[in-house]
Image (cartoon, rainbow, N blue to C red):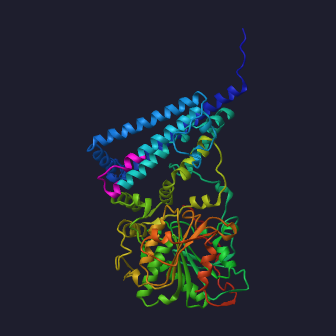
C-alpha cells in the first residue's frame, strides 16, 4: 500500500510552525537567561521596594477597589448596565447571522485604524469580537472614571493604566482574533509569524534584553545624507552643546540673528528633517541668520551636570557666541518644548542681571511654564516613581533615553506601540521608512542631577510659576519680571504640553504677549510648512484669563501659522543687511553631538 505525500502548502505550513516553536523557545530562553543574570548581579535583598512596582499602580488600584466596595449598589448597577449592553449586542449579532440588516451596536470605529480591515464589519464573527471589545472597554473605562473619593493623582493613574490595559487587550493584537493576521498566516503558510519572531529577536538584541520595537526602517536614514541636510557649520562647542550656524541663501538677511533652542530630551533635527518640512531651511530662506543649539547626548561623565549648567552652557553660552560671531547686541530666540521652559528661566535670570535687552523677542513652541495641569505626563510624576527613577539613575549617572521614549510612547500606545506589534511581529512586515519616526526613536540620555531637578521642581511641585520658587545660578527666578516681547505657539491636540496649560503663561509675563493655537499635535502642529497648506490656526489679540474664553473669540485661519509668525518676527528682526558669511567653523553641520546614539 502506498501513501501520497502531503501537499506542498501543508509541508511549508508545518515547517514554518516548527520554526515558530523554535524561535519562541529561543526568545523565552534568552529572556530567562538575561533575567537570571540580572538577579545574580543585583541580589533581591538589595533592591529598593519601589522597584517591584515602580509605577505604584498597585496602590492606586487598591484605593479604587476600596472605594468601589463602599457602594456595592452602584457596582451592581454598573454590572447590570454591562449585561444590558451585551444583550443588545447579541441581538445585533443574531440578526447579522440571519442575514438581516442591523445597525452597529457599538459606536462607529471608522477612524480607528485597528479595525480598518473590512472583515471587522463584514464578517459576523469578527464584527461580534470587535463590538464586544468596544462595549467592554468603554464600560470598564467609564466605570473606573466614575469612582468617587479618589485623590486626583490616583484617579489619573487609574484612568491611564486602565486605558493601557484596554489598548493591550484589543483583539487586533492577537493572532486568532485579527482577521488580517489570520489571512496572512493562511496565505503565507505561517511565514509571517516566522518573520515576526525574527523581528522580535532582533529588537530584543538591539534593546539588550528589553524589547525595543522598531518603528521605522532605521537603515533608510542617515544624518547628513537624507536628514538634517540644510547647509551649515558647527561654530561653537562646549561640554553640553554644539552651536550650528546655517549658510545664507538670500542676498540680504535681517540684522537681528535667530537662535533656536530645542528640548534636550530630543535631538534638534526635528527642526530640519528633510527639505520639504525643514523649519530651519524655511527660516534661512526668509532671510534669517539661523543658529541652532544641538545638545550633547550625555554619558556618565556628565551625570552631575545641573540645571544651572544647562542654562549657563546652553542658551547663555549660545547667546555669547552668536553676539561674538555676528557683532549684534540683540538676538531673537525660539524655544521648543522644554527648551522654551529653559529660555523663560534664562530671560528671568538676564532680567535680574540687568541684561534682558540682549534678547529682542522670544518665541515659545509648545512650552509649559505653569505645570499645574501637565496632562498625562503627570501620571509618571509621583514620589514613588521619582524615587525609583532616581535609584536607576544613581547606578550610571544618567537616565537611559529608551526609558524616556517609552514614557512618551505610552501616551499614544495604539499608534506608537501596538500598531507596530501587529505590523512587525504578527504580520511579519518590515516597518515603513518614516523620517519623523526615525527621529522619535533616536533617543537621548538625561544627566541624573539635571533630570531630577526639573521633574521635581517643575512637574511635581510646580515651583517655576511662583516668584523665587526656584533659584538658578544663584538667582531667584521671577517670571513676572520678564518684559521681553513673546509669542506662544501651541497645538490643540498636544498630549505632551496641553494647550490650555501652555496658555497659562500668558497671564504671567508682563511684556507684550501673543498666543497662537495651531491644529494637530505636539510635532505635526509645529512642523507644518506653508507649502503643505495643511491644518489651520487660531489667533486672538485679547488674552482673557480663561483659555476657553480665548478660543471662543479666536479667528480661525486655514494653513500654516509659520507665515503669521514670520510677520510678527519681522517686527523685531531689524533692518536688512548683506548676507553674513560664516566666519568661524570647527565642523560641518549636523555636527558630532547629534550623531551619538543612546
Q: Tell me which residue sits at (31%, 56%) in the image.
A: 151
In this orientation, does residue 212 appear?
no
Quadrant for residue 422, please give it: top right
Q: Is residue 230 above or below residue 20?
A: below
Counting every numbered tag in the picture gives: 0
Q: Tell me which residue sits at (43%, 72%) in the image.
A: 504
Q: Tell me which residue sits at (63%, 54%) in the image.
A: 216
Please state if 165 lies on the left or on the right of 94 as rendered: left
Q: Quadrant of the N terminus?
A: top right
At which x and y percent is residue 483?
46, 85
Quadrant for residue 475, please give it: bottom left
At which x and y percent is residue 474?
37, 82
> Which residue occupies the extreme top position in the image?
1
> Which residue occupies the extreme left position in the image?
70
Q: Which of 107 and 430 is in front in this view?
A: 107
In this orientation, does residue 463 appear?
yes
Say if the magenta span includes residue 572: no
Q: Tell me which residue sits at (72%, 80%) in the image.
A: 249
User: Which range of residues does the magenta coloring cover?
Assistant: 141-154
At which x and y percent is residue 259?
57, 80
Please state if 180 lies on the left or on the right of 541 as rendered: right
Q: Is residue 1 above or below residue 268?
A: above
Q: Nearer the viewer, residue 318 or 577?
A: 577
Q: Which of 565 and 594 is in front in this view?
A: 565
Please state if 430 lies on the left or on the right of 173 as rendered: right
Say if the magenta span includes residue 149: yes
At which x and y percent is residue 198?
61, 42
Q: Quadrant of the C terminus?
A: bottom right
Amino acid at each position: 500500500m502506498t501513501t501520497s505525500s502531503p501537499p506542498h502548502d501543508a509541508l511549508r505550513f508545518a515547517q514554518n510552525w516548527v520554526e515558530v516553536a523554535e524561535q519562541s523557545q529561543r526568545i523565552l530562553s534568552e529572556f530567562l537567561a538575561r533575567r537570571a543574570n540580572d538577579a545574580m548581579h543585583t541580589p533581591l535583598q538589595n533592591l529598593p521596594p519601589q522597584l517591584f512596582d515602580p509605577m505604584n499602580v498597585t496602590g492606586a488600584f487598591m484605593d479604587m477597589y476600596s472605594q468601589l466596595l463602599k457602594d456595592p449598589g452602584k457596582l451592581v448597577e454598573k454590572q447590570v448596565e454591562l449585561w444590558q449592553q451585551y444583550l443588545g449586542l447579541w441581538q445585533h449579532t443574531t440578526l447579522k447571522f440571519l442575514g438581516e440588516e442591523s445597525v452597529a451596536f457599538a459606536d462607529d470605529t471608522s477612524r480607528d485604524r485597528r479595525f480598518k480591515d473590512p472583515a471587522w464589519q463584514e464578517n459576523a464573527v469578527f464584527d461580534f469580537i470587535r463590538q464586544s471589545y468596544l462595549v467592554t472597554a468603554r464600560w470598564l473605562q467609564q466605570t473606573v472614571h466614575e469612582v468617587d473619593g479618589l485623590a486626583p493623582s490616583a484617579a489619573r493613574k487609574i484612568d491611564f493604566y486602565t486605558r493601557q490595559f484596554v489598548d493591550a487587550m484589543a483583539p487586533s493584537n492577537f493572532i486568532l482574533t485579527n482577521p488580517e493576521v489570520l489571512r496572512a498566516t493562511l496565505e503565507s503558510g505561517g511565514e509571517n509569524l516566522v518573520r515576526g519572531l525574527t523581528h522580535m529577536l532582533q529588537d530584543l538584541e538591539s534593546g539588550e534584553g528589553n524589547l525595543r520595537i522598531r518603528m521605522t526602517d532605521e537603515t533608510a536614514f542617515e544624518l547628513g545624507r537624507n536628514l538634517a541636510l540644510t547647509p551649515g557649520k558647527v561654530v561653537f562647542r562646549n561640554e553640553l552643546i554644539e552651536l550650528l550656524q546655517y549658510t545664507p541663501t538670500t542676498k540680504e538677511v535681517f540684522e537681528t540673528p535667530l537662535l533656536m533652542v530645542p528640548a534636550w530630551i530630543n535631538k534638534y533635527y526635528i527642526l530640519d528633517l528633510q527639505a520639504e518640512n525643514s523649519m530651519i531651511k524655511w527660516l534661512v530662506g526668509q532671510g534669517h541668520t539661523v543658529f541652532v543649539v544641538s545638545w550633547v547626548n550625555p554619558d556618565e561623565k556628565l551625570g552631575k551636570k545641573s540645571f544651572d549648567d544647562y542654562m549657563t552652557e546652553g542658551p547663555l553660552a549660545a547667546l555669547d557666541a552668536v553676539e561674538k560671531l555676528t557683532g549684534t547686541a540683540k538676538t531673537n530666540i525660539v524655544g521648543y518644548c522644554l527648551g522654551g521652559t529653559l529660555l523663560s528661566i534664562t530671560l528671568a535670570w538676564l532680567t535680574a542681571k540687568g541684561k534682558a535687552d540682549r534678547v529682542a523677542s522670544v518665541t515659545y513652541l509648545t512650552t509649559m511654564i505653569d505645570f499645574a495641569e501637565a496632562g498625562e505626563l503627570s501620571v509618571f510624576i509621583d514620589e514613588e516613581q521619582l524615587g525609583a527613577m532616581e535609584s536607576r539613575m544613581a547606578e550610571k549617572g544618567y537616565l537611559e533615553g529608551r526609558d524616556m521614549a517609552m514614557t512618551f510612547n505610552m501616551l499614544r500606545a495604539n499608534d506608537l506601540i501596538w500598531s507596530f506589534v501587529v505590523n512587525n511581529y504578527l504580520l511579519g512586515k518590515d516597518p515603513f521608512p518614516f523620517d519623523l519616526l526615525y527621529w522619535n526613536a533616536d533617543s537621548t540620555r538625561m544627566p541624573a542631577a539635571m533630570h531630577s531637578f526639573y521633574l521635581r521642581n517643575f512637574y511635581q511641585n510646580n515651583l517655576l510659576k511662583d516668584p523665587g520658587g526656584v533659584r538658578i545660578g544663584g538667582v531667584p527666578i521671577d517670571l513676572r519680571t520678564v518684559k521681553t516681547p513673546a509669542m506662544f505657539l501651541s497645538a490643540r491636540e498636544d498630549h505632551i504640553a496641553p494647550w490650555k496649560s501652555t496658555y497659562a503663561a500668558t497671564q504671567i509675563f508682563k511684556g507684550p504677549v501673543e498666543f497662537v493655537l495651531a491644529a494637530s499635535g505636539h510635532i505635526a502642529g509645529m512642523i507644518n510648512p506653508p507649502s503643505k497648506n495643511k491644518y489651520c490656526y487660531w489667533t486672538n489679540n485679547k488674552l482673557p484669563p480663561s483659555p476657553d474664553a480665548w478660543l471662543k473669540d479666536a479667528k480661525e485661519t486655514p494653513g500654516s501659522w509659520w507665515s503669521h509668525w514670520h510677520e510678527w518676527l519681522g517686527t523685531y528682526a531689524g533692518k536688512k543687511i548683506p548676507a553674513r558669511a560664516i566666519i568661524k567653523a570647527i565642523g560641518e553641520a549636523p555636527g558630532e553631538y547629534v550623531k551619538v546614539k543612546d
